[in-house]
Image (cartoon, rainbow, N blue to C red):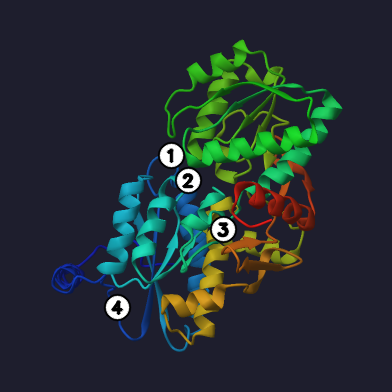
Amino acid sequence: MTNSMKTIGRRDFLKAAAATTTVAVTGFPYVAKADANTIRIGMTTILSGRVAMLGNTARAGASLVFDAVNQAGGINGKKIEFVVRDSEGKPDVAAKLTRDLINSEGCEIILSGESSAGSFAVQEVIRSLPVLCVHAETETSSLTADPKLFVKTAFRSCRQGIHDAVVGGIYASKLAKEKDLKRWVTCSPDYAFGRDNTAQFIELVKMYEPSIEFVDQTWPKLYAPDYTESITKILSQQPQAIYSALWGGDLVAFVEQANLYRLFDNTTMFSTAIGDTPVLTAIKQLPEGIHTAYRYSRKSPDTQENRDFADSFKKLMGYDPTGWGWEANVGAAFIVEALKRTNGKTDGAALASELEDMTIKSPLGVNGEITMRGSDHTIINYPVAWSQTVRKAPYLDNFVSVEWSKILEFEKEWQKSKGYIQG
């Protein structure tokens, strides 16, 4: 499917050495070029450790798009080479590998498969190098919403925290009223995404249901091996509900350890990330009734195009897509459409100009379309919903969505409150 795992050969080593020499002599950033008949697109993502369950699906989601382009003859006669490297979930490694992909390995476009922990480091690399970058997996809103972080050639093709917070706030506040859930705690990872996501959820759910009280918050470290301290702290508060932005293997470990303490017997859980298939299937005893934000489901959007996408992904990986899988797939589709419009030219500024306000057909889009908003380089009209866990495949049911017009209305007020746009 991809040559991403090829070992770097002697010719690549010599090319890397030449690139290093050029930087030293000229003092200008050096971007190595692929040969005339090839477009090299680089990705760093997490292919080892707990998060590999998601990084592998990001690679697969993008590969579906690039392989289809190559099978159809390429773009203006040029085939796509997809070069993927393992960042191990370390921001410094993600930044170094991204720079190496551009400077030494001839990649003229980056499709970043990093979580928020690594994406901010990658963003600064792209600021210094004139290539197109699409962030496919970072949900921290500020990456594209904060004008101080804006980079002309950088875009986002995934969910954004503030969009999900609106949907989650409406969904959770309705349930809180129905079930009289007033005493809440949070348990989220201690880094940019965890803090950002949790603060936005609290703001929105309290806006729609002011009687909710958050009595405690716990912040385990990212990739923490043991959640006993957090779980016992939560139990001591006797909450009626818990919100968590834990994700991937961390979330699996938390739920399994929480099961030992019977945390979910008397506490309703709201999770931003338990809806990913590898997470749902990795939990040995999946509790029923955990409420989760949309990651992916072949049942939503309920269209034949979405079911066809799920079948193609499952043929490649053996299971249904994840959030990271569809987000990388959408990012790759935007890159391909931009390349078609430039007749295969890879100039970063030219590609960025094409991407601004571009709308593409997508099986994941509301009414079959997703738009890359030009004002802040992030997508809108992607699937947003909440559902709850059930024990039988596909493990999620009762999807509840919110109209995008309502999401965008609140987002605009939020941007004003943060000083990101003028009132």
Q: Is residue 418 left or right of residue 123?
A: right
Which numbered disc flags the more N-terminal residue, 3 or 1?
1
On the question of residue 381 being in view, the answer is yes
Q: Are marks 4 and 3 in contact (CB under 8 Å)?
A: no
Q: Nearer the viewer, mark 2 or mark 4?
A: 4
Instruction: Give 313 or 350, whichever is nearer the viewer.
Output: 350
Q: Are marks 1 and 2 in contact (CB under 8 Å)?
A: yes
* Vertical placement of residue 410 versus 134, above or below: above
Query: In the rendered image of this protein, does residue 307 appear above or below residue 273?
Result: below
Q: Which residue is mark 1?
A: 50
As drawn, the label of residue 53 is 2
Q: Residue 269 shows which numbered tag?
A: none
* Amino acid type of the residue tagged 4 in the rendering: Lys
CA separation in Å, label 2 and label 4: 32 Å
Residue type marked 2: Met
Identify the amino acid type marked 3: Glu
SS of the residue under disc 4: loop
Amino acid bearing label 1: Arg
Between circles 3 and 1, the one closer to the viewer is 3
Q: Label 4 vs label 1: CA separation? A: 34 Å
- What residue is at 56 percent from the left and 40 percent from the top? 196
Question: Can you tell which mark lies on residue 327?
Answer: 3
Residue that appears at 42% across and 84% down = 78
